[in-house]
Image: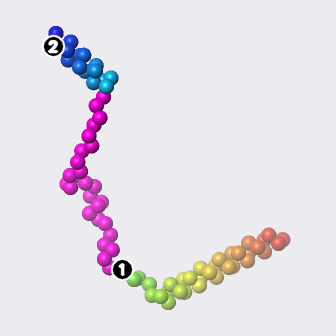
Amino acid sequence: MLSLILLEQAMFFLHHPQPVRPRKAVPELQVSSQAQVADTKTIVVKHSAKDLQNLQTHVKDNVAVKLAVKSAGKNK
């Protein structure tokens, strides 16, 4: 008789599943990559303003040359 009641209860819960509450986040179980976040308090400058200006000029020159070559190819 008891097994029949248990079977009926099991069938009821199979057909009517109950919502599952999400588990609370525990600090020890959180992803370890969160501890390795970059320190944004200080900004380290690796290149001077002059270096960046030279790079910008170099990129502009390269783009201008590529555009000139591309437009010359279309005019043929």
Q: Which of marks 2 and 1 is nearer the N terminus?
A: 2
- When the figure is inspected, residue 58 is found, relative to residue 36, above or below; the finding is below
Magenta stretch holds residue 50: no
Q: Please rate how many residues cluster around mark 2, counting C-alpha atoms within 10 Å: few if below 14, some from 14 to 19, many from 20.
A: few
Nearer to us: label 2 or label 1: 2
Q: In which quarter of the image is the N terminus?
A: top left
Q: How many labels does the image show?
A: 2
Residue most extreme to the right: 76
Left/right of residue 25 with respect to residue 62 in the rendered view: left
**Residue placed at 21% from the left, 12% from the top?**
4
Amino acid at dot 2? Leu
Q: Name the residue under label 1.
A: 43
Magenta residue span: 17-44
**To which quarter of the image does residue 13 belong?**
top left
Gap between marks 2 and 1 measured at Cα? 70 Å
Image spot of residue 22 (x, y percent): 27, 43
From the top left corner, tell me how far across and down residue 9 is, in percent: 23, 20
From the viewer's side, name the closer residue of 27 and 45. 27
User: Which residue is located at x 59 percent, y 85 percent?
Assistant: 57
- Kind of residue at badge 1: Ile
Q: Which residue lies furthest to the bottom in this view?
A: 50
Q: Where is residue 53 in the image (x, y as percent from the top left)?
A: 53, 86
- 71 is higher (above) or lower (below) than 51: above
Image-quadrant location for residue 39 = bottom left
> What secondary structure prevails in the magenta region?
loop
Residue situated furthest top in the rendering: 1
Q: Nearer the viewer, residue 14 or 43?
A: 14
Task: Let me know if residue 38 is in the magenta part.
Answer: yes
- Residue at the spot x=50%, y=90% of the render? 50
Q: Which residue carries the number 2 mark? A: 2
Tell whether 29 sits left or right of 47.
left
Establish if 52 lies above or below 67: below
